[in-house]
């Protein structure tokens, strides 16, 4: 159980760093959009690529949430 808990903690630390970088990037994108308003930030030819990246990102986040929830349920069952 100790090794599993340690892996969970280390994974959470790595995940927190990734989330912080994503937040910093989101802030940068938002600031860029505000500076250029009302002009678009992206050239029209790359808009579909960014839309697809956003769709993939949302899908990955949903799947990660499902994994976390299922792991929490499995962990709760182990403790009973």
Image (cartoon, rainbow, N blue to C red):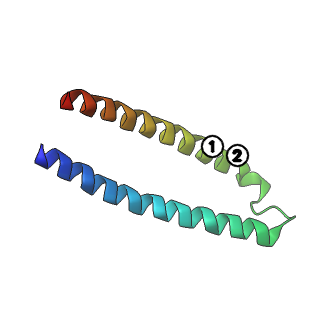
Residue at image point 42% right, 33% down: 66
Q: Residues within 10 Å of mark 2 (few under 14, many from 20)?
A: few
Q: Residue furthest bottom?
A: 35
Left or right, 68 with reference to 11: right
Q: Residue furthest right?
A: 38
Residue 12 drawn at (x, y percent):
33, 54
70 or 63, nearer to the observer: 70
What residue is shown with label 2? 48
Residue at image point 18% right, 53% down: 6
- Where 49 falls versus 74 (above or below)? below
Q: How many marks?
A: 2
Residue 39 drawn at (x, y percent):
85, 64
What residue is shown with label 1? 52
Residue at image point 61% right, 41% down: 55
Residues tagged 2 and 1 counted as in contact (Cβ below 8 A) = yes
3 or 61, nearer to the observer: 3
Identify the secondary structure beneath mark 1. Answer: helix
- Where 56 falls versus 26 (above or below)? above
Q: Residues within 10 Å of mark 1 (few under 14, many from 20)?
A: few
């Amino acid at each position: 159980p100790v090794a599993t808990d340690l892996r969970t903690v280390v994974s959470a630390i790595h995940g927190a760093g990734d989330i912080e970088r994503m937040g910093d990037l989101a802030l940068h994108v938002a600031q860029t959009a505000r500076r250029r308003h009302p002009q678009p930030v992206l050239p029209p030819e790359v808009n579909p690529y960014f839309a697809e990246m956003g769709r993939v990102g949302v899908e990955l986040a949903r799947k990660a949430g499902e994994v976390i929830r299922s792991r929490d349920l499995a962990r709760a069952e182990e403790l009973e």
